[in-house]
Structure formats: C-alpha cells, structure tokens
Image (spheres, rainbow, N blue to C red):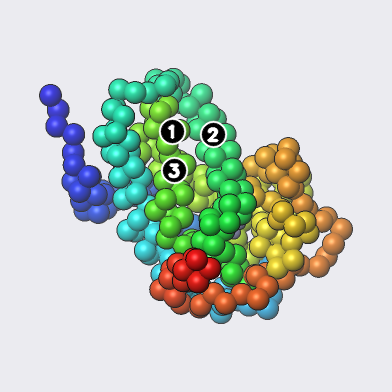
Amino acid sequence: MRQEPSFWEMYEWYLTDSYNAVEHWWQHSLFVVLFLSVCFLIMESFLPKKKAYYVITRKGFFVDLVYIFVYDFLLVFLVVFGLDMAITELIGKDFIIFDLMSLSYWIIFPVIFIMNDFMNWLGHLLLHKVPILWKFHKIHHAQEELGFGSTRHFHFMEYLIFRPLMYIPFHFFGVPPIEYMVFQIWMSFAFTFLSHANIKLNWGVLAYIFITPDTHYWHHAKNTPNEDNVNYASILCVWDQIFGYFYFPKEEKVEPELGLDNDDTPDGFIGQQIHPFKNLLKKG
Ligand SMILES: [Zn+2]
Ligand SMILES: [Zn+2]
C-alpha cells in the first residue's frame, strides 16, 4: 500500500522541490501573487482612481508587503493541506459525496467556480454579521487607503480558520487541496487584487456582473449606504443582487471615504494581530 506523505513532508515539498521547479511556478501562490502585484502596480501607476496617494506612498503599503509574505509564503498551503489531512484523519478518505474530479474539466471548472464564489460570499457576510468574527474582520476594514496589496490585509485568524473552512465542501466533492489552491490563487486572488486596486476604468456592464474597485470601495466606506453594508462579492455580484446587498451609485461622482469611525487599530502588523484579542478580553 502506498504510504501517504506526512503533513511536514508535504509542506517541505511545497517549500523546496516545488519552488525549484520553475515550470510549475503557476501552481504557487507566492509566484502568482508577485506576478499579479507587478501587473497591478503598473495599472495603479497609470490609472489611479484616488489621486491623493500613489502606489507606494499609500498608507499601509509596506505593512501589506509583510502580509503578502507571511500569508502567501508561509500560511496558505500549510492550512489547506493541514485541513485536508485533519478531515481525512477524522472521517476517512473514502467518504466523498460525489467525485467531481471524475467529470470533464468543462464541468469541473464552472462547478468549482460557482461553489467557491458562493462560499466566499457567504463567509464574508458571516464575518460582518457574527459579532466575534467582525472583531477580526475589522482589521481589513480599518484600512483608510486601498491598493492591490490591501487584499492580503487580514487578521491571521481569517487565514487559519475562516478561509480553510471554505475548503471543507470541496473535500467532500473529491477536490484535492492542490487543485483547490491553484484555482484559488488564479481566480479568487486575481479578482480580489482587482477589487482593492486603486485603478479607475470604465467597467460598463461588467460592473454589474463582476466585483470591481467601484463597488468594492463602497464595501470599505466609512459610512456605508445601508447599515448592513453592501457588496460582499468576491467575484460575481449576482449573490449581492439576489440578496439585496448590491450598491453601485452610477450617477454619483463622489468617492467614499474609507475606513472605520472611531477606530483604534494600530498601524503595524504585530499590533494589528494582537488588537482583536485585546478587544475580546476588554469586553469580557
Ligand atoms: Zn468585509
Ligand atoms: Zn476588501
């Protein structure tokens, strides 16, 4: 019987062999993130939406580089591999509801795309609606100036617990963690880089179908247009449209003021990681 690799063997592979295999660069979040960063850096330089700041003079730009390094290099694969193994350990590998991977890629791709996007939308809504989750998600919303790197500016609990949980349904559909991650880093990463990027373009009808900076910036508004907040989408706006959270003031030229009212979130990476725990202790 073939011996399953251990968790650490898998992570060692991720850090060493796989990184040496340049031809597989597209499977690895750090390389993809670096590639996307260069693309968006160029676009932000030529097409800025908010002109009060420039790519690297944006408040938080260098903190966001720390976020990118810590999350994309160290954490992302670690947690998804870990979760896959934990589920296998607890329930057994054979327990798969339906083996999606046995179908044609023409079916696999749209099914994963829709499932993944809905899970991300629902998860994001819960991060706002469940008070304890909001304490952690607030770190993302405390940003007063947005750029492509802001997409990685999340508390580590979201990466350790919330995001890996999104993988659970995929496990039961037989999607291996590596395929899931490759899908994530190309589809979800590309769109979340776009939705935070400081770029101005006329999106036309696309702004009603896909998330763009025009709609996601309203999600980050200091005074959101309705008290439930708006535009929770990761990729498709359809979920917001169906459940009444879509907001796109086409006529308004005014840009939203970003951030949170009366916010005391620290500016540094470590301070931001500790902050929600301090708040939890303070309020009992
Ligand atoms: Zn949010
Ligand atoms: Zn955001």
Total numbered labels placed on residues in the image: 3
Q: Quadrant of the N terminus?
A: top left
Q: Residue furthest right?
A: 251
Task: Determine whether the beta carbon of the residue marked 1 sits less than 8 angstroms from the nearest atom of ligand 1.
Answer: no
Q: Which residue is denoted by mark 3 in the rendering?
A: 165
Name the amino acid, label 2: Met
* CA separation in Å, label 3 and label 1: 10 Å
Q: Residue at image x 63%, y 66%?
A: 198
Q: Secondary structure at mark 2?
A: helix
Pick whichever of labels 3 and 1 is earlier in the sequence: 3
Quickly name the residue at label 1: 170
Q: Which mark is residue 56?
A: none
**Residue at x-position 46% and y-position 55%:** 158
x, y percent for residue 57 = 56, 79
Question: Which labelled disc corresponds to residue 115?
Answer: 2
Q: Secondary structure at mark 1?
A: helix
Report whether residue 56 is seen.
no
Question: Crowding at label 2, few (<14), some or many (≥20) Cα neighbours within 10 Å?
Answer: some
Label 3 residue SS: helix
The answer to whether 165 is drawn above or below residue 192 in the figure is above
Q: Earlier in the sequence, mark 2 or mark 1?
A: 2
User: The disc labelled 3 sits on which kind of residue?
Assistant: Leu
Question: Is 198 positioned to the left or the right of 153 in the image?
Answer: right
Circles 2 and 1, Cβ within 8 Å, touching? The answer is: yes
Residue type for callout 1:
Phe
Is there a contact, CB below 8 Å, between mark 2 and mark 3? no
When the figure is inspected, residue 62 is found, relative to residue 184, above or below; the finding is below
Residue at x 52%, y 47% (from the top left corner): 188
Residue 224 relative to residue 262: left or right: right
